Image (tube, grey):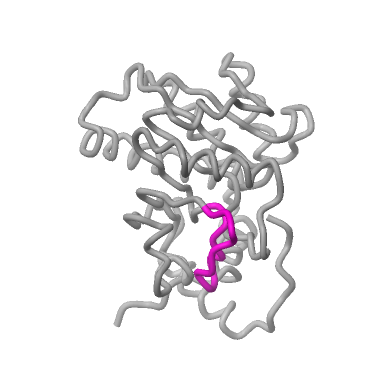
Amino acid sequence: MKPPPLSREAARTVDRLAIDELGLPGIVLMENAAINATAVLLDLVENRLERPIQGLPTAIACGAGHNGGDGFAIARHLSLWGADVRIACPRPVADLTGDAGTNARVCAAMGLPIDAEPPDEMWSAELVVDAMLGTGFAGDAVREPLAGWIEAINRGRAGLVVSIDTPSGLDSDTGTPAPTTVAADATVTFVDAKRGLLAQGADRWVGELIVAEIGVPDALVDRARAFAADAPASPTPPA
C-alpha cells in the first residue's frame, strides 16, 4: 500500500531526524534539494520550452526562510549551467541568517543580481522559479511585497512558472489557497508529496507535481510519518 502524503509536521520531522540522527547538516540537505530540483528544472526547460538553458532569462523569487534558501541554491546551480539568472528577495542579503543566508551570500559573491524591489517585467522571464513561501505557510493572506510579486508572476507567464516544495500561498496541509497564490505550471516538492498538494482543486495551483529527493533513507521518512501522526498538533511557525 502506498504511504500517505506528508503532513507539514512530518516534513519538518524528516529534516529534524536527518540532522539529529543521521548527522546530515541542514545545508547539505538544502544542497541535495537544490541539485535535484535543478535537474528537474533542466528537464522541464528542455521538454516544455524546447530550448537550451544557456542564456535563458530566469527569474527566481526567494523568501527569507528555508524555501528562499533552496531558491538561492537553485539560482547558483542554474547560473553554473548557463542560465541568465536574476533573483528577487524582500530582505537584504546581509540580514538573512542560517542556511538561506549562506546561499544568498554565495550568490552575491558570484555577482548574481539580487533585487529587493524587482520590476514587474522581471516576472515575464522565460523561466520563473517561485521559492518564496514553503510548507510552513498557513496564513489567510500573503504579506507584501510577496503578494505583489505573486500577482505579477501570475500576470507575466511568458514561459514556465515552477514552484519549489509548494506554490507560495497554498497551505501544504489543506490545499487551501490564499487570495494571492502562485499558479504554477509545475511544482517540485521534496521527499514525498505534501498532503495539500493532492487536495481537491489544488492542481490549479500545483500544476504537474514532481518529487525530488534530499538524500535521506525511506525508513527515516516512514518514521517521520509515524511520529507526526502520533504527535499532538503544534503551532505553525512563520513561513
Q: Residue furthest front?
A: 155
Q: Residue furthest right?
A: 95
Q: Position of residue 148 (x, y in %)?
A: 62, 42
User: Who is closer to the viewer here, 171 or 17?
Assistant: 171
Q: Magenta region, mostly helix, strand or loop?
A: loop
Q: Horizontally, is 48 left or right of 239 in the view?
A: left
Quarter of the image where one finds residue 16: bottom right
Q: Which image quarter is the C terminus in? A: bottom right
Q: Which residues are magenta?
A: 168-181
Answer left or right for 131 relative to 99.
left
Residue at 37% in and 29% down:
126
Q: Is residue 222 above or below residue 97?
A: below
Report the front residue among 202 and 151: 151
Say which quadrant the N terminus sits in: bottom left
Q: From the top left corner, tell me how far across and down residue 56 is, in percent.
A: 36, 22
171 is within the stretch colored magenta: yes
What x and y, as percent, mark residue 221?
Answer: 47, 68
**Residue at (37% x, 18% y) in the render:** 82
Q: How many marks?
A: 0
Instruction: Name the residue located 40 percent from the left edge and 42 percent from the top edge.
Output: 161
Q: Position of residue 190 (x, y in %)?
A: 45, 55
Residue 159 visible in image: yes
Q: Is residue 173 magenta?
A: yes
Residue 224 in sight here: no
Q: Nearer the viewer, residue 58 or 188?
A: 58
